[in-house]
Image (spheres, rainbow, N blue to C red):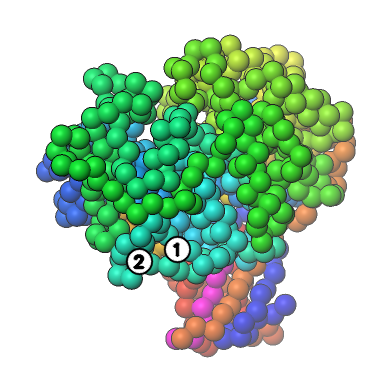
Amino acid sequence: MVVLGGWLGLLALQVSGAGVEVGTRQRTLVPVELPTYTPIAPSNVAAYVEEGYAQWQWEGGTNDGVRLDLMPADYVMATRQTRLLSFFTISDIHITDKESPAQVPYFGWSAAFGTQGPGGLNPSSYSPAMCATTHLLDTTVQTINALHRLAPFHFGMALGDFCNSGQYNELRWFIDVMDGKTIVPSSGAHLGADMIDYQKPYQAAGLDPSIPWYAVIGNHDQFWMGIGYPTEKVRQALVGSNVLEIASPPGYGPLVPEASEGQGTYVGVVDGTTTYGDVIHWGPTNDFAVPPTVAADPNRHIITENVASPTDFVGEFFKTTSKPVGHGFLQDGTGSTAACYTFEPLANVPIRMIVLDDTCKADEPGQSPTFYGAGWVDDARYAWLTNELQRGQSDEMLMILAAHIPVCPQESLTVTNKTVGRQFYDPVVETNLVATLHRYPNLLMLIAGHRHVNVVTPFPSPDPAHPECGFWEVETPSLRDFPIQFRSWEIFLNSDTNISIVTTDVDPTTQPDSPAGKAVSLGLGALRVYSSIELTNTASHAYNAELVKQLTPAMQAKLAGCGETQWRRVSVDSGTDGPEVSFLGRLESTDSLSVPSWAEIPDATNSPYRVEAPRSQQFFRSTGQ
């Protein structure tokens, strides 16, 4: 429809197959360099800003181009023809009950400058961003909704680690934010809820009800702090009032059994009455005349009653108002496959999603006893996976495998050696999985989270005569730790009937003085104080690319004519100062459709962000880049 300036409506416009710039393809958040610095303690959060550790700025977008790693050496790139699928992924949200008596913030709060603390756990054990994890999710949902308005998503996926420590209230906060409920982002006595911004109740926006979303289970959704077996001591501490007391022997991290079942150190809690979320009730037991306490809260109980089968976790996804009920999980699932399922996003596009739970379920060879942070696929899940892969191949379906823990990913964006045996307890299990996946040429890619990084790993076919047996692995970063991004995806059928996977990182839109806006800055500051990011590193850490995949002749024939023409919307709303336009790409306007002369609106290339439109103009359109 045509949109008049100042009138609420939508204009659907086709654009060229080259697409438009979205998210970090248009602009990207980068740290400001600190060539000289003053060492500060991780607990001196105010100094993160004062000393420049939390400073960042916007720079131009990033595009890493077309990746042909899976294609024959003489392959000539084709053009995109139709869009088959569009979706988003979020991962590693780590919704945190910061006032829980059994988190372990002390081990980050008390760390020395430039170190990651006992066990190398930071910023996992402490980051000031933990004060606003529900807010970061909510602003991400709002950004997804804004993008959906302009370039609709067919569905979304959350790739695990919704919780930080497997608590019931953490999981409910996640689901309730997605559902658009009223959020009370505090627990226990709800200290500071009447005066501290990150503690105040608020109304979550909720994901646009036209977008179905699906869930993948992560290690932090089941285990204490993501890696510890929920022993009886830990279970009781979670719902009690006494702050958890553990030991931290030299050479051990605080979460291994030798420490968690010991004594000598209180783990601390966040004081919700403080501006930056100061950690209190921490330190050597001998420093306290009486054990420190907080207000108990039964909603802090561990959600997983039986680590061998996450049916309690799965059951919570049926207590939702967003779609679909269950968010992919099956109510009758049992055993280690209880969180495994498949679905087909579109009835008229032969693409099937396969969701695999690849988290640990029992003590396995190669792991420390009761230490559950890495990946594992037991015989039951391996049989389930191979059955689904074969079924997809037989049904002539393209397949995307979704799991929380990546399989043999490369070290980083720049270091390409594979991390065999570092994500899974048993390197044989991990390498066997890769060999298995190579046997199914209709597998497009594996998508995962867990490492909080943007890394794309190619797995070319082991047989050069059959390049269709290669696949991609793409990781989605965390919504708690820098770079705090989610991914958007578009899958295209190209003119040669092969596939292009266009993946783009998106920075959630935040207001500078909001809890989420502060968390972005302070979360970056924490990583720099811990030396997880070098102080001279000014990279965006985003990675955007077009990943090309060879199809079999059978799938090329089946997909001929499939998909939709790529298109975008322009939305025009009534603002307080006149029309406000949201768009993707470049924005153009005209005052008449009678032999219109479209002119670009200066500085209106910061898609997908809203700009004021000239009052004299009546018609607007976006153009590709």
Was residue 322 drawn as part of the magenta stretch in this picture?
no
Considering only vertical position in the picture, is 528 above or below 586?
above
Q: Can residue 359 be seen here?
A: yes
Disc 1 residue type (three-letter): Val
Residue at mark 2: 193
Left or right placement of residue 577 versus residue 157 in this view? left
Q: Secondary structure at mark 1?
A: loop
Does residue 142 lie above or below 166 as drawn?
below
Front residue of this view, candidates 609 and 474: 474
Tag 2 and tag 1, C-beta contact below 8 Å = yes
Q: Position of residue 405 (x, y in %)?
A: 55, 30
Magenta region, main secondary structure: strand
For this rendering, which residue is in front, 345 or 81? 345
Up/down of 490 relative to 208, above or below: above
Mark 2 residue crowding within 10 angstroms, few (<14) / some (14–19) / many (20+)? some
Picture quadrant of residue 428: top right
Q: Residue at x 57, y 54 (%)?
A: 175
Residue 353 horizontal/vertical position (percent): 72, 39
Question: Residue 581 magenta-drawn?
Answer: yes
Please give left or right for residue 206 compared with residue 331 in the image: left
Segment colored magenta: 577-587
Q: In the rendered structure, which disc, 2 or 1, sits on the residue that comes first in sequence?
A: 1
Q: Position of residue 564 (x, y in %)?
A: 78, 54
x 54%, y 42%: residue: 303
Q: CA distance from mark 2 to mark 1?
A: 8 Å
The type of residue carrying mark 2 is Ala
Q: In the image, is 15 to the left or to the right of 21?
A: right
Q: Which mark is residue 184?
A: 1
